[in-house]
Image (tube, grey):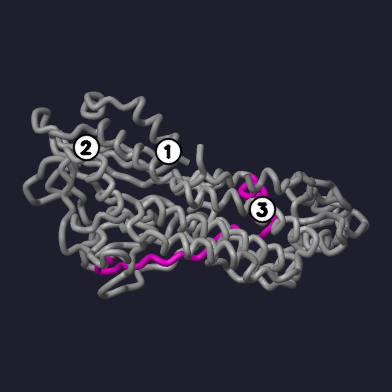
Amino acid sequence: MDELKIEEVEISDVWQEPIQTGVTFVPRSVHGKPVLEADVGDFAKWLRQSNPDLAVSLPDETGRLDQRSNELWLPLMLLASDTSVSVMLGIVANYLYDRAKGLLASDKQKIHLSLVYEDEVAGKTKKLTYSGDPEGLAKVMKKFDANRFLDD
Amino acid sequence: MTRFTDSAVERLYERNLPQLRRFLQDIDTNPEGETDGSFAAIVSDLQKLELLDPDAADSRFDSIYILRTVLDFFETYATLWRRVFRGAYSESWIALQDAFDQLRLIRRLSNVDIRGFERQLVQLEECYPYEIFTSTGMVVDYVECGICHEPMDSPSCPHRVGFLYRGKLAYGIARGKIELDHLSIVKNPADKRCVIPVKDSSDAFSVVRFLSSLLKQRTIVVSDFGDLKWSTRTTSNPEYKKLPRNVPCFCGSGRKFKTCCINKSTVEVRHVDIVPVRLNAEDAVA
């Protein structure tokens, strides 16, 4: 079942360093060690190759958490003010399409993603969390409007 | 649309289509037969093609890799049905998952039509009892590229896991400290070979065992298998005992029979019909 959650967050709870342009992948702590989900490497590489204008910040010195799952786990993505949520959702959808090329009809795709977006003008930071299939993500994209996101 | 991006490999495949079709027909006539080395001549031709022009375009080497995978798939397909025929159900599940992995690779990297096999094998997968799987979560320091040996996530490595680079499949190697983080029971694992083991003699294999018996009796041949129709049927309850209304129920609940299982003389059971849908060799290998 698809799950979509949008909540207001404090940016200081998510990221303590200066926000880069584009997208920053935020590690999480596992046993006190900063790690990123294993799928991040391929996603970041695909981003650099297919969207060369988008700045991708992949922190060094982070381990990789390999969940050995058939589902796609992306780490928390922090979007700078030059990158809109709807554009990023579209990019993720394209990536899912790329990954689906080798799938059999019986293979089920599922994605887990979270985006944090800060609008410095409005002074609000929100977090979008989605777990579900690509069709559900397409519905979120259709409904989604960056302005509404900030007004929710 | 050509199946392979390299024309020499395409021609080699075309030339060997009759042999591939005969291979499938042989599985029908002798599902227990050994098939090792069946494609030795084609493999030899591929090796010659590989050495013919070391400066050929990447597509030549990629196409050779894919055709080898197609041949591997045929061997795996034969192994799978041989194991089903022999009653080695747990091992046949492994071969089935190997076959799926090969089909995914073929689909992603070529235009070879695999839909006939896919349709049949997805139905075969339904015959098995496995619904939950074990899955480990591990924290690794970094992942090294199997091609350039750089850290896979660094900008210096251009390779993506599962893609071909001049006939070499990119894969990642976990490096540094590797820590087990968790062990999970999941429904959608990366590797369906990680099952909770079931003995071949178990009732859980009743459907695939029935299929095996049909093959042994020659009621059907492998290429006849193509569809399953699941339904529920009402049958008499083997545990039901007709008792006086006011005595304790046979089920051990402690309640009176009249307020417990009095109406449970029949039970609903899942039923499956194996419906023949021919996998024609001409269509399967086109």
How far across and down, in percent of the image, does residue A41 sit? 27, 55
Q: Which residue is found at the position 32% from the left and 45% from the top?
A: A113
Amino acid type at image mark 2: Lys
| Quarter of the figure that contains the C terminus of chain A | top left
Residue hosting label 1:
A134
Residue A5, quarter of the rendered image: top left
Q: Which residue in the protein does label 3 denote?
A: B126
Where does the magenta region start and end?
B116-144
Q: Nearer the viewer, residue B44 or A122?
A: B44
Structural distance between the alpha carbons of marks 2 and 1: 22 Å
Whichever of callouts 2 and 1 sits on the residue coming sooner in the sequence is: 2
Q: Amino acid at mark 3?
A: Glu
Q: Secondary structure at mark 1?
A: helix
Q: Tell me if I can see residue B205 in this picture.
A: yes
Q: Which residue is mark 2?
A: A126
Q: Nearer the viewer, mark 2 or mark 3?
A: 3
Rendered location of residue B82, percent (x, y)? 71, 67
**Is residue A6 positioned above or below B110 on the image?**
above
Amino acid found under the numbered disc labelled 1: Pro
Dot 2 lies on which element? strand
Q: Chain of mark 3?
A: B
Q: Chain of mark 2?
A: A
